[in-house]
Structure formats: structure tokens, C-alpha cells
Amino acid sequence: MQIRKISRVLAMTAVLPAAAAVAAVGGIVTVSQQNRAFAVSNERIAHGQTIRFDNDDQFRHQIYVESPSFNFESDEADPGTTVDILFAKAGVFQVRCHIHPKMLLTVDVN
Ligand SMILES: [Cu+2]
């Protein structure tokens, strides 16, 4: 009886992470840009996910990523527009804005 309970718990913990990973594939996470800052300073996503940056500011923004394994550079984006970045590789990436050097979002891609 006791052994049966434990094995059922183990089976559930084995299934849950797999289901979460499947749901995350191809998903879009939205990050707002407001008051010359990203609305969050850290974001955790799975590789294959996209972050959509909404310019909810009254200013233009620009978005870039510089790293050994992944680089991205957007045009300047007007208020009310969006920029999508697909993170295909695992790693930790710093997302910045050329126009506002204090803007920083750290993205942890699993
Ligand atoms: Cu900016």
C-alpha cells in the first residue's frame, strides 16, 4: 500500500515537467517597455520561445543582444510597435537598448 502511493507520486512528478516543456515550445512571452525601462529585469524562457517587446512608451526604443552564441539588432521602434526576438539557443543573454543605455533585461533561456 505504501509503495503504491510513492510510485504514483513519482509518476506524477515525471509527467509534469514534460507537459510544461511541450506547452512552452513556440510560445510568446511579452515584455513591455515603459518609462525608458523594461517592465521586468529578468525573464526565464525555454529555447524556441519568442519574447515580444511592446513599446508602451512615448519614446523610440531599439533592442539588441550581443553574445558569443547569439546576436540580434533591431531598427529603432516607434511607440506602439513591437519587436520579436526568437531565442533558439539556451544560455543567459542581456537585452539592451542603444538609445537608453540603462535599459537591461537578462533573459535566461533553458
Ligand atoms: Cu530604449
Image (tube, helix red, strand yellow):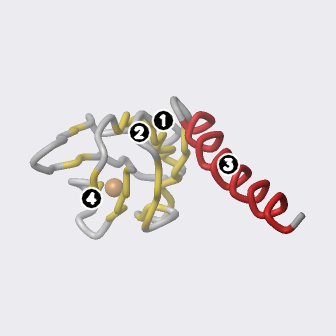
Tell me the amino acid under the disc marked 1. Thr
Question: Which of the numbered marks, if any, corresponds to residue 16?
Answer: 3
> How dense is the environment of label 2, judged by Cα within 10 Å: few (below 14), some, or many (20 and up)?
some
Question: Which of the numbered marks, if any, corresponds to residue 81?
Answer: 1
* Residue 82 in view in this figure: yes
Q: Nearer the viewer, residue 46 or 59?
A: 46
Numbered disc 1: secondary structure: loop
User: Mark 1 or mark 4, which is nearer the start of the sequence?
Assistant: 1
Q: Quadrant of ligand 1?
A: bottom left
Tell me the amino acid under the disc marked 2. Asp
Question: Which of the numbered marks, if any, corresponds to residue 94?
Answer: 4
Q: Nearer the viewer, mark 2 or mark 3?
A: 3
Question: Which of the numbered marks, if any, corresponds to residue 78?
Answer: 2
Q: Nearer the viewer, mark 4 or mark 1?
A: 4
Q: Nearer the viewer, residue 55 or 69?
A: 69
**Residue at image x 37%, y 50%?**
109
User: Mark 4 or mark 2, which is nearer the start of the sequence?
Assistant: 2
